[in-house]
Image (spheres, grey):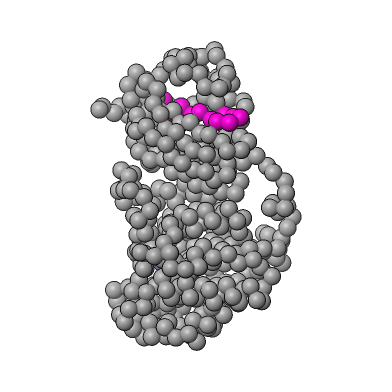
Amino acid sequence: MTLRRLPLVAAIVLMASGLAGAEPPPPGAGSSPRAAPAKPPKAVAPDAVRPTTFTATLTDVRVRSYPSFTRVVVETTNPIRSRVDANGPTAARVRLIGVDSDIRVEPVHDGFIGELRIDRAATDTIIYVSFEGAAGELKTKTLSDPPRLMLDFMRPLEPGPGRREGDTRLRSIVLDAGHGGHDSGTRGPTGLFEKDLVLDVTRRVAKLVRERLDVKVLLSRDDDRFVTLKDRTSYANRENADLFVSIHANGHRQADSAGIETYFLSSEATDTAARQLAALENNVVQFERPVAAASARPDFLKTILWDLAQSEFQVQSSRVAEILLASMTRALRVPNRGVKQAGFYVLGGAAMPAVLIEIGFVTNPKEERRLKESGYRDEIARAIFFGLAEYKRDYEQGPRGALAPAR
Ligand SMILES: [Zn+2]
């Protein structure tokens, strides 16, 4: 197969205006695309500049569900042109012009979108999107390096008790115990597994919050089971949580590495150690999906982090990370390793402020010994609880702008 590179200018021409029910007619075609339900693809008026051969190959399709929209990211080998052929009422049809692909079905079933069907029509790829409920607005955007088409299917607004309008309370927190099941996380010199330690600490935090804070607490796992990184935040999104806190323990080849640190998401790591840790915690992604061509690339995670909604919550997330670290440092008398940024995949999918806490080094013999003690686990849980309580006050005292310290 020969791949021709399109000039960049041509690639930026995105024909979908992104307005549901108001798709512009394709250039050079007089027919209205609103004549859905689906015409056979061959009947679509020929595009004046349609390539007669493939100019790009579809390399990956990623779907993320958020409370207010479902984001489909289509990654291709070269920049492409696309067109929304139809949107609603029961399905949408997006045409990727000159794109080769493997025909397949990707189930979504998030209460809004049913599935994606990826099909080919001559030298185009067609993405059929079926809706489980009512269709909503479709917003499209192109990203480069690697070339991606982002399709945001907006859920139709449904006013109700689930939505908060002017409600400034911190109502619910998802506590996410890292790892689980066949993913043990880090292992200490005498055999303490990160997955067991963090589940126990998470449960202790949850108990305190339930007893003492007027906040609903949800756990992404409450036993020794494997949960994919994506499912952890999808759960928080489905539950409309106001905060996502992932609890982990650290590991390092240097046995004397010690202390606690908190993280929020960034595609740029604070330093080499932060980058290495993120790579370690992201390792589990390989358990989640067959290695697609795209995920074999070293920059895969960096790319998908840019696709995710978490970047919109960076300021609030850094605030939570600061408060929690300060609270733990005060209480636990361990080295403060600072608030850091790194590309943690688990945080990326959250549509709310999200942080990751490393409660200590299980690979440090001294810390491992402490981390095995029930009394010390209670101290950690209390320190996290006090941090959450402080963030709740901070959050509710608003104005919300007060959460955005200028720095
Ligand atoms: Zn971990």
Residue drawn at (61%, 59%) of the image = 241
Q: Is residue 161 left or right of residue 192?
A: right
The extreme left residue here reads 1
The image quadrant that residue 70 belongs to is top right
Magenta stretch: dominant secondary structure: strand
Give coordinates of residue 22: x percent, y percent.
Answer: 62, 25
Residue drawn at (53%, 73%) of the image = 203
Above-or-below relation of 83 to 318: above
Above-or-below relation of 161 to 177: above
Residue drawn at (46%, 41%) of the image = 107
The image quadrant that residue 125 belongs to is top left
Ligand 1's image quarter is bottom left
Quadrant holding the N terminus: top left
* Foreground residue among 31 and 401: 31
* Foreground residue among 123 and 180: 180
Quadrant holding the C terminus: bottom right
Q: How many marks?
A: 0
Q: Is residue 96 part of the magenta span, yes or no?
A: yes
Q: Is residue 51 part of the magenta span, yes or no?
A: no
Decide if residue 211 is in sight here: yes
Decide if residue 245 is in sight here: no
Q: Which residues are magenta?
A: 87-97
Give coordinates of residue 106: x percent, y percent.
Answer: 43, 40
The image quadrant that residue 41 belongs to is top left
Residue drawn at (52%, 24%) of the image = 85
Give coordinates of residue 264: x percent, y percent.
Answer: 49, 62
Q: Is residue 190 left or right of residue 36?
A: left
Give coordinates of residue 321: x percent, y percent.
Answer: 53, 68
